[in-house]
């Protein structure tokens, strides 16, 4: 497991972000459209063929494995395949995480692709988002890995506009305790507490700004 140095200038990071973001947004839109479409079966068959052609075009030049977790010399994070924040990952909501005084926060919208109970966010999705956010809050000096995380679902989280926060409550050596919440307009829907650990191997790694995907 290694982070990868992507030796490019910050302006080039932004240029590439500008190239990939509209593509990923459109694929995200495609996922939502497939879930909610009511067109006839002939139109579905045509759509499937056209999408398969696009997949073949994209596959004509591919990297061997996953994108990896990259960073620039200035330590800007490029976790662009990441399941929660990845700029190139249409499965990511994505979360645009901002640093605040006591930790991290983000506002986001979850649509039909994240449904579990009727009209509500899947519990595993809430857990994934909170895992990432707590880990992000805990990764202020070096990247941390989740050791243990507990989620308490206080009431169903309805699909739609949501806010999440995470902060660190305790640090002992390589171990941090972090807490966090997801809220809708009426207040907190679920909360998490976790133990996050800086692996021995990462102790000398430089701090990386991960918020920007
Ligand atoms: C990505 C880009 C964006 C990055 C932005 C940042 C967000 C990242 C968030 C992503 C979160 C993830 O998905 S991370 C992926 C999911 N997690 C993993 O795959 C982790 C797999 N497990 C491991 O690699 C390892 O077991 C570690 C690193 C967790 C621990 O190994 P270690 O470093 O050898 O730890 P060790 O010396 O034994 O113990 C150190 C201290 O931690 C405690 N400890 C050890 N394991 C655990 C545990 N599972 N739960 C609780 N506590 C534990 C010990 O009791 C000890 O406490 P004491 O005696 O000192 O008190």
Image (tube, rainbow, N blue to C red):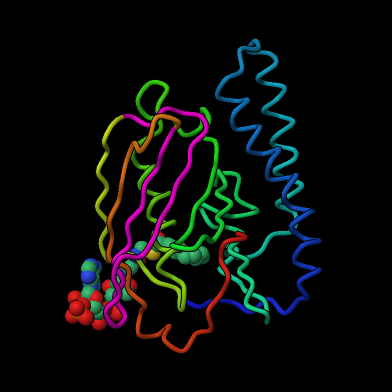
Q: Is residue 180 above or below residue 189?
A: below
> Who's the residue at 31% across and 80% down the image?
174
Furthest-front residue in view?
101
Per the image, is 166 magenta?
A: yes
> For this view, does 190 lie left or right of residue 95?
left
> Who's the residue at 68% across and 41% down the image?
25
23 or 46, nearer to the observer: 23
Where does the magenta region start and end?
156-184
In the rendered image, which quarter is residue 54 located in?
top right
Q: Position of residue 47 (x, y in %)?
A: 70, 25
Q: Is residue 157 above or below residue 181?
A: above
185 or 93, nearer to the observer: 185
In the rendered image, which quarter is residue 107 located in?
top right
Per the image, is 193 magenta?
A: no
Main secondary structure type of the part rendered in magenta: strand
> Who's the residue at 81% across and 61% down the image?
15
Q: Position of residue 112 (x, y in %)?
A: 51, 27
Q: Position of residue 150 (x, y in %)?
A: 24, 52
């Amino acid at each position: 497991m290694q982070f990868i140095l992507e030796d490019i200038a910050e302006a080039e990071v932004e240029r590439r972000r500008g190239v990939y973001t509209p593509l990923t947004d459109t694929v995200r839109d495609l996922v939502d459209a497939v879930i909610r479409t009511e067109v006839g079966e002939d139109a579905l068959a045509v759509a499937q063929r056209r999408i398969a052609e696009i997949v073949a075009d994209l596959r004509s030049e591919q990297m061997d494995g996953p994108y990896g977790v990259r960073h620039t010399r200035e330590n800007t994070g490029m976790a662009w395949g990441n399941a929660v924040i990845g700029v190139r990952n249409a499965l990511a909501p994505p979360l645009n995480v901002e640093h605040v005084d006591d930790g991290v926060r983000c506002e986001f919208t979850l649509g039909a692709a994240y449904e579990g109970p009727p009209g509500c966010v899947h519990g595993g999705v809430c857990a994934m988002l909170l895992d990432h956010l707590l880990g992000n809050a805990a990764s202020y000096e070096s990247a941390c890995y989740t050791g243990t995380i507990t989620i308490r679902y206080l009431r169903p989280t309805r699909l739609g506009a949501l806010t999440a926060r995470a902060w660190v409550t305790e640090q002992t050596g390589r171990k941090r305790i972090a807490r966090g919440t997801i809220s809708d307009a009426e207040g907190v829907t679920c909360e998490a507490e976790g133990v996050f650990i800086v692996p021995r191997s990462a102790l000398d790694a430089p701090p990386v700004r991960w918020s920007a995907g």
